[in-house]
Image (cartoon, rainbow, N blue to C red):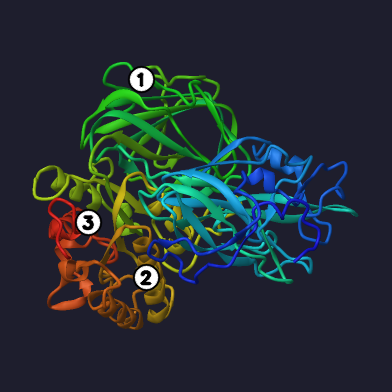
């Protein structure tokens, strides 16, 4: 859109870009290229960040507005800082606030090396006329063997884009007239690449036209975590007030699915506006309550005992030798040395965890339970436990029924837990880890939690908006079971809208190489929002799931498993928890026991079948 682009001439590529999101590998098309691909920072031609004392020094959007360097520092996004987003490691530009820090996409060739399952771009769209619709275009991934594939990249507008999918949100805009209170956002957008093929370079999309610019701050291959299996996971459902917690230790209880000889944990500061300091962390086997079986094993982060997690980002601990049994309870402890007033949280843990008293300091190394005088029924910060080795994982994407609402607390009787035990006890198919990505009250197509700010709503952003983080970025993900939609229907969504959402989820997951298994929606007559109209729309959605024409690789008929044969609109009384919406322990076990395990396995894997 703009004329002045000082470094644009370096690495411009023209033509040869198809329109498909990911086409079969093909010989590289003929291009006109004046220079070899360059590192992204050599192509920077736009300055997005200004010092707050000189707010007119940068021009992000062509109208003089820019990001606040102070706001970025307050979020932990300091120049040169590695920011881990959805399992990709991106570097915030070292030049931010002083020199050009992003490139306006216009066909530049970016040097990039490595094998990956996907590429993640840190991007935003802008428009000189004010908040806009964002920017998009088609670029090309070039491989070392001379082949290439096109990709589609869309960058939401930095002022008007959705809160639910942003990487970071900042509270101000800088302008030549001074600072203005208005939210600015940046986004991490991931696109598929050919698995196993070594990347040589990435050609950015051409200029999207006079109405918008597509800004690229960073790009990185996202490696699929070879050699690791996800053993436990929880999805961040909201951002809620706590305490404040000051100089305290959390001791969180989690239940493994797969076992392995080494372990690492994932901590996430999702939805946050400020960084969080982790003073220390450890892992241990649970004896009982907050007591460990033996001395907890300390965890490190980049060789250090603690770490700071920027707003919106995540961090993996360094791998540590620690034999993790399958089907066992772990204690993951973390010390919070500073004052913490709000946390990203999974609210419905159905599991008691523990908290030391205010000012009690770092208790992560203590095997005993004496210091842990408080209890929690949530999982703050902790989103994953991975083990070394194993065949990969199945992800259960769902709502409160998958989350385990109304199951027995501390008993691990959620249907994904029962499925995990089934997988451990057989040899017909791989003994996958099982990752629970259920969120109570969650919907397919609408956000409950808006994705920004402190809120009491912990229903999460929609499955559409969390698919990348909670499924596609999970360690070792091989298959996803999609069991969701009842909350959309209970709150009035048309069947066609839910069907379109399920189609989108399945297409995106399959595009990234996952096997997608659809599960029919269980009945709920007798619950206040489960009207006859809602049930009619449920029947329409279930008819689609059962006969989707190939949208799903396989189908699990959970509706048929738990419904009352004499009254199909309601749950069989023996399976009903009592609220007519959630199955109890027996119903959840029936769901897991009904799964034909071969349906979880793709062709070419041991036990695989066409589905």
Q: Please tell me whether residue 48 is drawn above or below residue 307 in the rendered image.
A: below
Q: Quadrant of residue 487?
A: bottom left
Residue 584 in sight here: yes
Q: Nearer the viewer, mark 2 or mark 3?
A: 2
Given the current orientation, which residue lies at the most extreme right position? 177
- Estimate the spatial distance between the alpha carbons at disc 3 and disc 1, rounded to whole Å: 36 Å
Q: How many marks?
A: 3
SS of the residue under disc 1: strand
Q: Quadrant of residue 232?
A: top left
Label ID, residue 149: none
Q: Which residue is mark 2?
A: 502
The residue closer to the viewer here, 587 or 553, is 553
Q: Residue at x 29, y 24 (%)?
A: 322
| Residue count near mark 2 (Cα–Cα under 10 Å), binned few <14, some 14–19, many ≥20 | many
Q: Residue at x 79, y 69 (%)?
A: 129
**First-in-chain label (1 vs 2):** 1
Label ID, residue 297: 1
Q: Which residue is mark 3?
A: 584
Q: Quadrant of residue 600?
A: bottom left
């Amino acid at each position: 859109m703009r004329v002045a682009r000082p470094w644009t001439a370096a690495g411009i590529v023209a033509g040869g870009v198809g329109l498909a999101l990911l086409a079969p590998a093909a010989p590289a098309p003929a291009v006109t290229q004046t220079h070899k691909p360059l590192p992204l920072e050599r192509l920077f031609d736009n300055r997005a960040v200004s010092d707050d004392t000189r707010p007119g020094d940068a021009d992000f959007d062509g109208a003089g507005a820019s990001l606040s360097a102070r706001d970025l520092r307050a979020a932990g996004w300091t120049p040169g800082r590695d920011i881990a987003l959805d399992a990709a490691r991106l570097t915030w530009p070292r030049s931010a606030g002083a020199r050009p820090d992003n490139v306006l996409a216009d066909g530049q060739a970016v040097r990039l090396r490595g094998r990956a399952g996907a590429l993640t771009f840190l991007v935003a769209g802008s428009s000189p006329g004010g908040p806009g619709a964002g920017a998009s275009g088609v670029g090309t991934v070039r491989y070392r063997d001379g082949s290439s594939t096109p990709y589609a990249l869309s960058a939401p507008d930095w002022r008007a884009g959705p809160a639910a999918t942003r990487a970071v949100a900042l509270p101000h805009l800088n302008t030549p007239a001074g600072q203005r209170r208005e939210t600015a956002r940046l986004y991490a957008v991931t696109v598929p690449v050919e698995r196993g093929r070594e990347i040589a370079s990435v050609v950015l999309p051409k200029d999207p036209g006079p109405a918008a610019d597509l800004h690229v701050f960073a790009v990185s291959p996202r490696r699929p975590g070879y050699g690791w299996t996800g053993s436990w996971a929880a999805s961040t459902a909201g951002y809620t007030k706590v305490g404040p917690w000051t100089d305290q230790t959390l001791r969180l209880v989690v239940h493994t699915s797969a076992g392995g000889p080494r372990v690492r944990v994932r901590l996430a500061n999702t939805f946050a506006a400020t960084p969080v300091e982790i003073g220390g962390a450890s892992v241990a086997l649970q004896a009982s309550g907050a007591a460990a079986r033996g001395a907890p094993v300390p965890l490190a982060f980049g060789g250090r005992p603690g770490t700071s997690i920027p707003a919106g980002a995540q961090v993996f601990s360094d791998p540590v030798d620690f034999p993790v049994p399958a089907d066992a309870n772990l204690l993951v402890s973390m010390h919070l040395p500073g004052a913490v007033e709000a946390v990203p949280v999974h609210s419905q843990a159905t599991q008691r965890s523990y908290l030391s008293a205010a000012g009690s300091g770092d208790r992560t190394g203590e095997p005993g339970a004496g210091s842990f005088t408080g209890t929690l029924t949530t999982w703050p910060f902790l989103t994953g436990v991975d083990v070394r080795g194993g065949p990969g994982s199945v992800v259960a994407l769902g709502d409160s029924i998958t989350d385990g609402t109304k199951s027995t607390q501390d008993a691990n009787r959620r249907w994904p837990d029962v499925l995990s035990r089934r997988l451990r006890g057989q040899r017909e198919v791989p003994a996958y880890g099982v990752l629970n990505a259920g969120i109570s009250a969650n919907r397919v197509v609408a956000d409950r939690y808006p994705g920004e700010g402190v809120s009491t709503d912990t229903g999460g952003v929609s499955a559409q908006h969390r698919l990348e983080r909670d499924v596609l970025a999970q360690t070792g993900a091989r298959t996803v079971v999609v069991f969701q939609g009842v909350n959309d229907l209970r709150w009035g969504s048309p069947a066609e809208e839910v069907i379109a959402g399920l189609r989108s989820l399945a297409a995106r997951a399959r595009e990234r190489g996952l096997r997608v298994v659809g599960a029919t929606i269980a009945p709920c007559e007798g619950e206040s929002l489960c009207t006859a109209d809602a049930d009619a729309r449920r029947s329409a959605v279930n008819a689609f799931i059962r006969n989707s024409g190939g949208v799903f690789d396989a189908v699990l008929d959970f509706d048929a498993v738990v419904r009352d044969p004499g009254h199909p609109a309601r749950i069989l009384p023996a399976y009903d928890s009592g609220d007519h919406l959630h199955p109890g322990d027996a119903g959840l076990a029936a769901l897991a026991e009904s799964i034909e395990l071969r349906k979880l396995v793709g062709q070419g894997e041991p036990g695989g079948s066409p589905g």
